[in-house]
Image: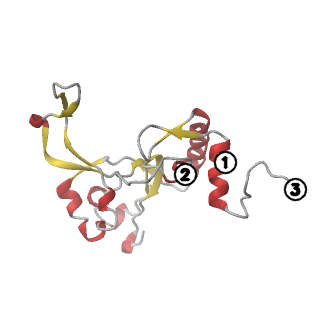
Amino acid sequence: MIKHALSVTRQADFAAWYQDVIAEADLAEESGVRGCMVIKPWGYGIWERIQTVMDAAIKDAGVQNCYFPLFIPLSFFEKEADHVDGFAKEMAVVTHHRLIGDGKGKLVPDPEAKLEEPLIVRPTSETVIGAAMSRWGQSWRDLPLKVNQWAGRPYGARRRRRCDDRDAARARNVPQFCRGRPRHAGGRR
């Protein structure tokens, strides 16, 4: 009989096996913030290697990297309202730009530092990205536009009963992910 180092095999239950690998390899740990994790140096080193290999393949395909803002004005985000309903409850909202002491040893948002317009934490907003790409591609001569976005992805205030090793797969703070954003003649993506 074959013995395995982990309690479950990849073939039997991939999700459980993956969580066992994260736990047994000690790649990540709780951060003290519900739903967020600290990726340890060994775990982050693995991520950096994956990113390096992926980035090289992306660039070999003629794709260039770009960066889009993490904070999106609420008015921009409202333009996405038709497809936002499913995940709007998970969006973090920034309303102030400074904290002050409340005189009781706590910090509170400074009422005088309220933003003119709330900002939504969303690094993949189509309103910002679409507007930029329409400026970059003025005619068919500019096509195809082949860009990739590497972005950190903080997920909103999802509530879970506890923070555990599953955070490595479903954490609120994903260190980075990539999203290709090609534009071709005829509107193909």
Residue 24 placement, left or right of 74: right
User: Where's residue 24, x and y in %?
Assistant: 67, 43
Viewer-side residue, 15 vs 82: 15
Q: Check disc 3: other Cα within 10 Å, few if <14, some if 14-19, many if 20+.
A: few
Q: Is residue 58 above or below residue 144?
A: above
Identified by mark 3, the residue type is Ile
Q: Is residue 89 above or below residue 93?
A: below
Quarter assignment of residue 144:
bottom left
Q: Secondary structure at mark 2?
A: loop
Sequence-first disc among 3 and 2: 3
Q: Which mark is residue 39?
A: none
Q: Which mark is residue 21?
A: 1
Identified by mark 1, the residue type is Val
User: Where's residue 104, x and y in %?
Assistant: 19, 26
Q: Check disc 1: other Cα within 10 Å, few if <14, some if 14-19, many if 20+.
A: some
As measured in the structure, the alpha-carbon distance from the residue carrying label 1 to the one carrying label 3 is 18 Å
As measured in the structure, the alpha-carbon distance from the residue carrying label 3 to the one carrying label 2 is 27 Å
Viewer-side residue, 96 vs 6: 6
Identified by mark 2, the residue type is Arg
Residue 86 placement, left or right of 119: right
Residue topped by disc 2: 166
Quarter assignment of residue 81:
bottom left
Residue topped by disc 3: 2
Q: Residue at x 42, y 49 (%)?
A: 172
User: Where's residue 66, x and y in %?
Assistant: 39, 48
Q: Residue at x 54, y 39 (%)?
A: 29
Residue 152 placement, left or right of 125: right
Residue 106 placement, left or right of 65: left
Sequence-first disc among 1 and 3: 3
